[in-house]
Image (cartoon, helix red, strand yellow):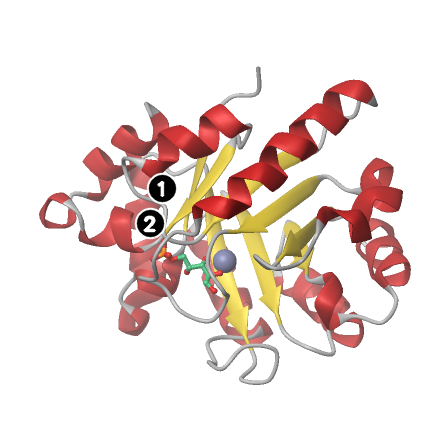
């Protein structure tokens, strides 16, 4: 049984002081930091890029779990690695050569993440599972925090967990979007071992992020 880890999304944090937010999250028990990169093209929103990630790198030694919601993505992978990304997660929907993007991330000695939008079937990544360190299952359509959880994606997690056991693989299963204190239990039961959360961590219980991380971790 993999240890349950919490990867808070800074998208829901105070963008005027992201460095301090990251320090707060580390002190509150975050296992890694989920950094949502958006380009206004792959998703209808824009956030931060390599210069900001580079500036944030010195605020923590925690893993930067970087979720690239950008297209094209391949030509920018090295920039995110150089900025300090530890896990680089790409969307197959954003690259015409997933294999090349996976190889590029591995060549840069970073962990390979692949993220599937709610309507994307797991079939498109089954041939790559041996090369993937983490599968990020979106439980919302990417672009914004605070959206409603889509429970139908739990089926994908169950299937991936079964395949992982059958093929004796070891990739992590991360879920991202609308996670709260109720559906986190369902996600873990389905087989997720990393929970991304922005709104629930930053806004619940009067913004007590330590309590919120602990509640999610004990789901
Ligand atoms: C959405 C992002 C998610 C989002 C999660 O496109 O990928 O990481 O920030 O935020 P909540 O937990 O508020 O849905
Ligand atoms: Zn994300």
Q: Which quarter of the image is occupied by the N terminus?
A: top right
Q: Which residue is mark 2?
A: 23
* Label of residue 158 in the image: none
Quadrant of ligand 1: it is bottom left
- Picture coordinates of residue 28 (x, y %)? 28, 38
Return the residue nearer the eye: 37 or 145: 145
User: Marks 1 and 2, Cα distance to the nearest angstrom?
Assistant: 5 Å
Q: Extreme top residue here?
A: 1
Q: Residue at x 52, y 29 (%)?
A: 190
Would you identify the image quadrant in which residue 6 lies? top left
Secondary structure type for disc 1: helix
| Image position of 216 with respect to 40: above or below | above
User: Can residue 105 be spotted in the picture?
Assistant: yes
Q: Are marks 1 and 2 in contact (CB under 8 Å)?
A: yes
Q: Position of residue 5 (x, y in %)?
A: 46, 32
Q: In this rendered view, identify the residue nearer to me: 139 or 55.
A: 139
Residue located beneath label 1 in the image: 26
Whether residue 109 can be seen here: no
Q: How many marks?
A: 2
Would residue 15 be found to the left or right of residue 104 on screen? left
**Residue at x 47% of width, y 24% of height:** 189
Residue 103's spot in the image, x, y percent? 88, 54
Residue at point 33%, 49% (across, down): 23
Q: Is mark 1 within 8 Å of ligand 1?
A: no
Up-down relation of residue 166 to residue 96 (above or below): above
Q: Secondary structure at mark 2?
A: helix
Residue 105 vertical position relative to residue 211 in the rendered view, above or below: below
Asked if 175 appears above or below 162 in the picture, the reply is below
Question: Residue reaching furthest left?
Answer: 206
Q: Nearer the viewer, residue 88 or 197?
A: 197
| Circle 2 Cα neighbour tier, 10 Å, few/some/many (<14 / 14–19 / ≥20) | some
């Amino acid at each position: 049984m993999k240890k349950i880890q919490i990867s808070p999304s800074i998208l829901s944090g105070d963008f005027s002081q992201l460095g301090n937010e990251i320090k707060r999250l580390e002190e509150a028990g975050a296992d890694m930091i989920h950094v949502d990169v958006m380009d206004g093209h792959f998703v209808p929103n824009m956030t931060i890029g390599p210069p900001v990630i580079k500036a944030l790198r010195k605020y923590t030694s925690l893993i930067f779990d970087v979720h690239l919601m950008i297209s094209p993505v391949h030509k920018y992978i090295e920039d995110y690695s150089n900025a300090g990304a530890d896990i680089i997660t790409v969307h197959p929907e954003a690259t015409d050569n997933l294999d090349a993007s996976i190889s590029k991330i591995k060549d840069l000695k970073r962990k390979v993440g692949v993220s599937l939008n709610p309507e994307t079937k797991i079939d498109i990544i089954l041939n790559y599972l041996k090369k993937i360190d983490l599968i990020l299952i979106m439980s919302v359509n990417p672009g914004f925090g605070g959206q409603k959880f889509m429970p139908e994606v739990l089926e994908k997690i169950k299937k991936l967990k079964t395949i992982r056991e059958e093929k004796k693989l070891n990739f992590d299963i991360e879920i991202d979007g609308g996670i709260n204190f109720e559906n986190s239990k369902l996600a873990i039961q389905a087989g997720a071992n990393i929970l991304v959360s922005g709104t629930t961590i930053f806004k619940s219980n009067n913004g007590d992020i330590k309590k919120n991380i602990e509640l999610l971790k004990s789901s």
